[in-house]
Amino acid sequence: MRITLNGEAREVTEGQSVASLLTDLGIQAERVAVELNLKIVDRRTFTGTSLRDGDRVEVIGFIGGGRSDDDER
Amino acid sequence: MSDDRLTIAGIDFRSRLWVGTGKYKDFIETQKAIEASGADVVTVAVRRVNITDRKSENLLDYISPKTYKILPNTAGCYNVEDALRYARLARAAGISDMVKLEVIGDEKTLFPDTAGLIEAAKILVKEGFIVFPYTNDDPIVAKRLVDIGCQVVMPLAAPIGSGLGIRNPYNLKILMEAVNVPVIVDAGVGTASDAALAMEYGADAVLMNTAIAGAKEPILMAEAMKYAVWAGRMAYKAGRIPRKLYATASSPIEGML
């Protein structure tokens, strides 16, 4: 099935959990926030939250920035 | 000066110089500059994680949340809805309930949209956030922010990244008198004397990014800023002499030939 991950289409296995997606991506779960169809997923439910076809997922973290003019390099 | 702590919302801050983490050459330089600045608070931006290049390193590997207080910002948000979304995501990332709230009004000046700021701050305060609002040097807006529950205000000295220094010292002084919460001068500092001046006026802290990261020698400038903030703070506490138009001799007349 297909989801949109950080704005890009991505094939994932049927019913894959948020936790397993992060593992596949090599991302440490404790340092990110996940938004699923504009709703924040509680990190305690990463394992129990299954993705569905067409889901829009955002994985967000912290980057260098102090001010509004400081975008990622 | 080591016992001269700044406390906001029950949180003790060791340093009165706070720094941003943007615009550095690389993470090593970021780390060294922040170390040299003596800051214990660093601001970070909230962005999509790079999922295509997972070898790319993470800022937090260099700036550990165990050592530094991480203050996520809503930089780049031009409306209330986006600012709320970024603030909530930052909190969900699990580092803290603090957020430096920016609702930007205009791309050219990056001045805050203070109406939007007050609206967003009100909602976030209700949700339990510790809101650090980036605001204009407007005492009335600062009072409104305090009225709705902000425990600190962060007025600008000049436009973000401009390096113009304190453009409106009188407004800033009025603002500091008008509110009974800590005031952190945020944005517009160009060099050490600007930071010292902000502290001499009675600011509780200064936050900067570009003035350090954009200097020819960022690490050296970071250290300069550390001393400038100390000097300004000490001078403020010591109490300066009044300005007079004419001279007053320092040496006694008595005993002269």
Image: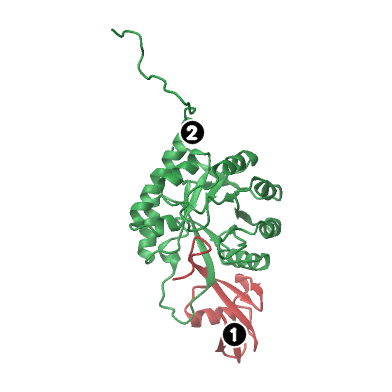
SS label for mark 1: strand
- Is residue B2 at all visible to an observer of this figure? no
Q: Position of residue A37 (x, y in %)?
A: 66, 79
Q: The numbered mark 1 sits on a residue in which chain?
A: A
Q: Residue at x 61, y 40 (%)?
A: B174
The CA distance from mark 1 to mark 2 is: 56 Å
SS label for mark 2: helix
As drawn, the chain in red is: A
In front of the other: label 1 or label 2? 2
Q: Amino acid at mark 1?
A: Thr
As drawn, the chain in green is: B
Circle 2 Cα neighbour tier, 10 Å, few/some/many (<14 / 14–19 / ≥20): few
Q: The numbered mark 2 sits on a residue in which chain?
A: B
Residue B215: quadrant of the picture: bottom left
Look at the image and tell me in which quarter the C terminus of chain B lies: top left
Q: Position of residue B3 (x, y in %)?
A: 47, 38
> In the rendering, which numbered label is found on residue B232?
none
- Relative placement, left or right, of B42 versus B142 is left
Residue B54: quadrant of the picture: bottom left
**Vertical order, B5 against B77 (above or below):** above
**Vertical order, A46 against B39 (above or below):** below
Q: Which residue is mark 1?
A: A4
**Vertical order, A59 against B212 (above or below):** below
B167 or A50: nearer the viewer: B167
- Is residue B57 at all visible to an observer of this figure? yes
Q: Position of residue B170 (x, y in %)?
A: 57, 41
> In the rendering, which numbered label is found on residue B237?
2
